Image (spheres, rainbow, N blue to C red):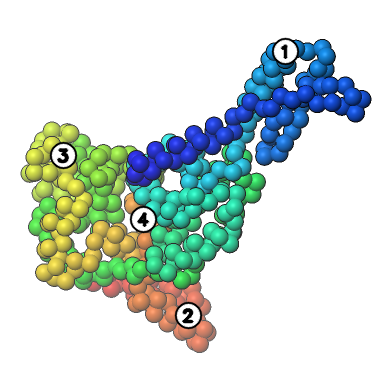
Amino acid sequence: MIRSTELIAGNARKEIVRRKRYQNGSLQVVSTHGKRKMWILQYRDGGSKKYHTIGLYSKMSKSDAQQAQAEFMKEVNARAASTPDPHITFGDFLEGVALPSLRSKWKRSTRDTENRIGHHLLGEFGPEKLTSLGVQRLQAFLTAKATTLSKSVVAHLRWDLRAVFRLAQAEGYIQRDPTPALFTPKEAKVGTKRVMNRKEAQQHINALPLRERVIDHLALFAGMRPGEILALQRKHVAEDCSELIIEQRLYRGDIDDPKTALSKRKVGIPSPTAAVLHEWMELVDRKPEAWVFASENAEKPLWRDNVWYRHMKPKLETVGHEWANFQVLRRTHASLGHDIKVDPKVAADQRGHGIGVALDVYTQSSIEARRAAAEMLANAILSGEQPETAARERETEENRSVAA
């Protein structure tokens, strides 16, 4: 979270801006071209000097003119208070308008992005005028970040900027939103996204004791997120362990709603996983509210980091698979399922996200599958064989291999 001192400073700057926009105006007596004296009120509107005629000097006392001045300036100040300040800084807008608005719709896990926003955006653009920030300035910032940060973080910063500037335009602080023209630089580092093959997946499972092996099964074969696994209570598990109900997740020790609307679902459990889960459930408290994977005091569920760093990773280091964390398990579930032609829609529903995410984010085709596809295409073209025929023959051969 942004430090409280920074928030206080931001509120103080906001209060200074608000005070500057309040004014009393200057009451003056001015002779017109006809040499008649008039009560004239001078004030500022949007940075420009303006004049308002109060009335004839000969027909109004000073107190009457001052009363008219007060009534007119009340209207001016009311308009100014409801009109966005064109000189507001990025920092004042972020702390005074954007973050309060965004917090109202963020889940707790998303609210942690305040660390990123505070460190990168507020630190870079805080004192600059919001209206002075254009495409070139913002893109230069993203390009500079791409030299040290991952592509994912830079892409999130671009998303943060878009959210802030869309709101600024909607609230009338800027006329045009520069952020649709921003892009994630190609220089941004792309991390290697590894997946396990079948042999590695078997070694991964076999290296773990019962409790951690059950967690491994649920992640690898059922496609569940670690927060969903650790938030399970006995009431969420079918009597025969053939299906689970996902209606909550564990996030940093707190029970929260599932990640998305699609994440709230029923999960089908394969028989090998149901067998080890059933064995584990025999050791779990019989109360419906009991945690399936309880902490030592049994009152709270295990934390993800604790179960990984204390119990899973040390065991996996003995077989050289400590790199295969929960993200790898999820990608492996998607990728191996894709290789054996699990229906993409079924796989996406099982993991609790959209089919586009299933294919574009989690699924990675193996080099063997790519080589086989290239082989099939080359044979079809060079031999004159129809691709459909070649595909059917390849599928038949793969089915025989799986059956064997």
Residue corresponding to mark 4: 347
Q: Secondary structure at mark 4?
A: helix
Say whether disc 1 or disc 2 marks the residue closer to the N-terminus: 1
Q: Nearer the viewer, mark 1 or mark 4?
A: 1
Q: Which residue is mark 3?
A: 300
Task: Give me the C-alpha separation between circle 3 and circle 4.
Answer: 31 Å
Using the numbered discs, state the Cα–Cα distance from disc 3 to disc 1 in whole angstroms.
Answer: 72 Å
Nearer mark to the viewer, of 3 and 4:
3
How far is mark 4 from mark 2, CA to CA?
27 Å
Instruction: Choose the circle earlier in sequence order: 2 or 3.
Output: 3
**Which residue is denoted by mark 2 in the rendering?**
377
Considering every residue shown, the one lying at the far bottom of the view is 382
Q: Is residue 342 visible?
A: yes
**Residue type of the residue flagged with mark 2:** Leu
Check disc 3 and give the amino acid type.
Answer: Lys
Residue type (three-letter) at the residue carrying disc 1: Asp
- Residue ID at (26%, 70%): 197
